[in-house]
Amino acid sequence: MFPVKELKRSALISLWFAFLTFPIMVIKVNPIERTVDWRWDNMFFIALGSFVISILAKVYLLRKERLSGRKKVIKVVNEPFVHRILREPRFLYPLCLAVLVFAVAFPYFFSTYQTNIMTTALMYVVLGLGLNIVVGVAGLLDLGYVAFYAVGAYSYALLNLHFGMGFWAVLPIGGLFAAFLGILLGFPVLRLRGDYLAIVTLGFGEIIRLILENWNDFSSGPSGIANIPRPSFFGMDMNFESGIIYIYYIVVALVIFTIFVVNRLQDSRLGRAWLALREDEIACQAMGIDKTKTKLIAFSLGAFWAGIVGVIFAAKTTFVNPASFTFLESAIILSIVVLGGMGSIVGVIFGALILILMPEYLRALSEYRMLAFGGILVVMMVFKPDGIISNVRRSYRFKKQSTISE
């Protein structure tokens, strides 16, 4: 039987939720006619909906708790279906090949608009994988990741404006600038962790944005920099549609390269050091791992990918200004990592595709986009805190070598 205490708590939650959403969902100001509409029916539906969701969540958690209690004696481990596919090469390789063929053929079956949206989603895949190194693998909460993205974008814009440098020349330079900035950020935050680290990185992201916004002689201020050239293909001029398809293939190649590098890094000695740092910093130091070096490499590598994507962003939009690099961008990239699964490459890819493509195809509900966004994250944290596709925890077993009997 469902406890009365939980019913009261759900009712309280629904009232509190209705109160919090009151200014957005109930009050509608019409500045032209100077009238205020009071939409009380919205408040009723929000209270009712949050009450029902709260009850369902509590029922689910109670049921889960009871089931886990029954399984204390005999623990049965059911491996998730996705993990089984990722572990078995006979399933994984054909699936990767099918995805690659789909990605290559995508521009020929869909419109330019769809290709442009997919390019944006794939750029966020790379950003998510870059932040996944810092947050998901090394366990360092970074809320100012968009600063490195901005450094890459402005590197291309300024180097092209003042020195006439092309896309391919600036692509590695933008990444290296961002990586250097990542090292500069890493030094003062070496002793920080958790919330304190998050606050410092958040401040760092805002400092970069304010510099770009207020230093007019350097970055043209809020007006931004326009007429940034698109990447060329061996000096050939391309029309608008061909340019979009070309950038799409560049981003697809970058995604494949990023997945390969991040996967190899996770399996390397450095990747294991990051995991140890994430689990227990003191134990990690006790095992002889250089904490300073490990943290700085994590920050610089994560920033490098953001810088690379920033250069592509500037080339894709042909215009950059500080409004493109607000805290909301950092929040979206962090949400991609949290929603997909911290430390999971496949999870981050799914998270980026869901969070970037879903708002584009649900433009009819754009008024409630951020509300749905927050709701999804709350539901994920309650029901699946490890993300959509959680990372498989590595385990190592000692196998005793068989002795040859004489």
Image: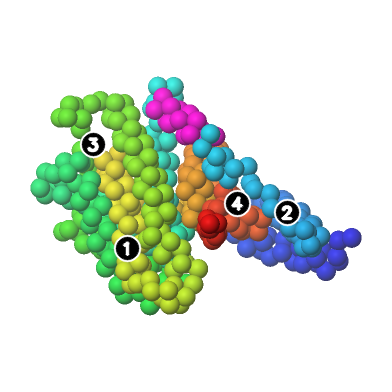
Q: Earlier in the sequence, mark 3 or mark 2?
A: 2
> Residue 133 or 95: which is nearer the viewer?
95
Residue beneath the point at 20% across and 54% down = 220
Residues in magenta, as a range = 91-105
Would residue 47 be found to the left or right of residue 337 on screen? right
Which residue: 81% across, 60% down? Answer: 70
Task: Name the side, left or right, on which 179 lies relative to 28.
Answer: left
**Residue under numbered circle 2:** 76
* Residue 98 spot, x, y in % from top left: 48, 29
Q: Quadrant of residue 71?
A: bottom right
| Whether label 3 touches label 2, CB < 8 Å | no
User: To which residue does mark 4 refer?
Assistant: 376
Q: Which mark is residue 258?
A: none
| Contact (Cβ within 8 Å) of mark 1 with mark 3 | no
Q: How is the image coloured?
A: rainbow
User: Residue 111's x, y, as percent?
Assistant: 42, 25
Secondary structure at numbered mark 4: helix
Between residue 402 and residue 363, name the one nearer to us: 402
The N terminus lies in quadrant: bottom right
Residue at the extreme left: 163
Q: Amino acid at mark 4?
A: Ile
Q: Which residue is mark 1?
A: 297
- Of residues 220 and 126, which is closer to you in this image? 126
Decide: few, some or many residues near mark 1? Use Cα within 10 Å; few <14, some 14-19, many ≥20: many
Q: Nearer the viewer, mark 1 or mark 3?
A: 1
| Mark positioned earlier in the residue sequence (1 or 3) | 3
The answer to which of marks 4 and 2 sits earlier in the sequence is 2
Q: Is residue 138 magenta-colored? A: no
Mark 3–mark 4 distance (CA, rounded to whole Å) = 36 Å
Q: Which residue is mark 3?
A: 230
Within-10-Å neighbours for mark 4: few <14, some 14–19, many 20+: some
